[in-house]
Image (cartoon, grey):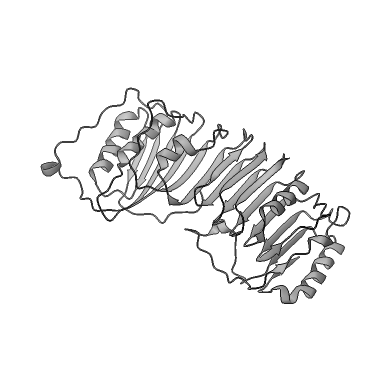
Amino acid sequence: MQVKYALDNNSACHLDRWVSFAIASKTKELTLFLSDHRIKSFIMYNEGSYLFTRPKDLYKFPCHLFDASNSSYLRGLQLASVYLKLPADFSGIRNLRRLSLVDVDVADEDLESFLSHCSKLLEFLEIAYCGTLTAIRATRLLNKLKHLRVGVCDLLEKVEMNCCCLETLEYIGPMVSLAFTETSSLKDVCIKFMDIDAGLDYINKGFPSTLTNVEILYLHCIDRERVTLPLRPLKFVHLRHLRLELVISERKDRKTDVLGYARLLEVAPFMERLDLHMWMDCPHQPYDRRTDGELRSKLPPHQHGHLKWVDITGFFGYKDQVLLVLQILCSSAVLKRMRISSRVLGFSAKMD
């Protein structure tokens, strides 16, 4: 059952009756999108933009209508532009597999309680544009959770998940603390920070230490500081594909040096594919040997024996960009293809 129409709490009597009808009809999938019909999952949008008009008086979703007996058929619940407050005797939706909350007003403790009461079979969780949340916390083990999407929650400060079977993680928004008790099966990670931070610094210091088996990492950062990795940086021994989207926009003297990203070869010793997409709006001129002197790229102590494909866009011939390309070429023993383009790509919200 789906209701996709701009409705608010003034229509509560009708909406309550429809929800009751869905429960009585043993509905498996219930969707309430109570804003403009163009609303979609947050992951469909670039740069956190979205297209919907929020009702002023949000509909209060009737959690009190659900109990352990009448909600046993419900497998999927998608809510958008509603108010969610749990009653004291809420017993959960025991067989829920998929939960999506978009533009939902919900308190931290109510979300935590909701997840704890739906923890046994939940496989997919999406939380986006929930402007009241400061923490997303699951203290009870979500032992079936495979896919987690969190995005554009402006007040969010931390995500703490107790899960063991997570396979994909997608996060868009300000830099927050991401903590996982155990995620040995997690292989695909997509993180898009919308505030300023250095990608190298996050990879070395901020990336969750429990995510040891990541094979595909997509990281989007706005970089304005020069960062130097320690002599022995954290290594991602399972990482095979790294996609890094780097935004450098400085109107004055640029402090960043993209040559530092050559250290990624040391951070990911078994990486096979590197995609580096740059958006650089800064006062630099392309390299000119007559004014900038000869290029001298310092050879690394060890060659990278696994990197085969390199794709670089946003290349304008700045000296540090040229040095980075030379460093990768000189370091890669089995490189099959390197593509370099001045074309600036529109940054994606998700990995290809």
Q: Which residue does the image show at 67% across and 39% down from the upper left? A: 162
Along the viewing direction, whichever of 93 and 310 lies nearer the viewer? 93
Residue 260, relative to residue 81: is it above or below?
A: above
Residue 262: quadrant of the picture: top left
Residue 142: quadrant of the picture: top right
Along the viewing direction, whichever of 241 and 134 lies nearer the viewer? 134
**Residue that protrudes farthest toward the top in the picture:** 301
Q: Is residue 169 left or right of residue 324?
A: right
Q: Where residue 317 sits: x, y (%)?
A: 24, 47
Along the viewing direction, whichever of 105 and 244 lies nearer the viewer? 105
Along the viewing direction, whichever of 140 and 335 lies nearer the viewer? 140
Q: Which residue does the image show at 41% across and 25% down from the upper left? A: 232
Specify whether residue 58 is in view. Answer: yes
Q: Where residue 266 sits: x, y (%)?
A: 40, 29
Q: Is residue 251 left or right of residue 101?
A: left
**Residue that protrudes farthest toward the left in the picture:** 290
Quadrant position of the N terminus in the picture: bottom right
Q: Is residue 121 left or right of residue 195?
A: right
Residue 163, relative to residue 79: is it above or below?
A: above
Specify whether residue 274 is in view. Answer: no
Q: Where residue 49 sits: x, y (%)?
A: 50, 63
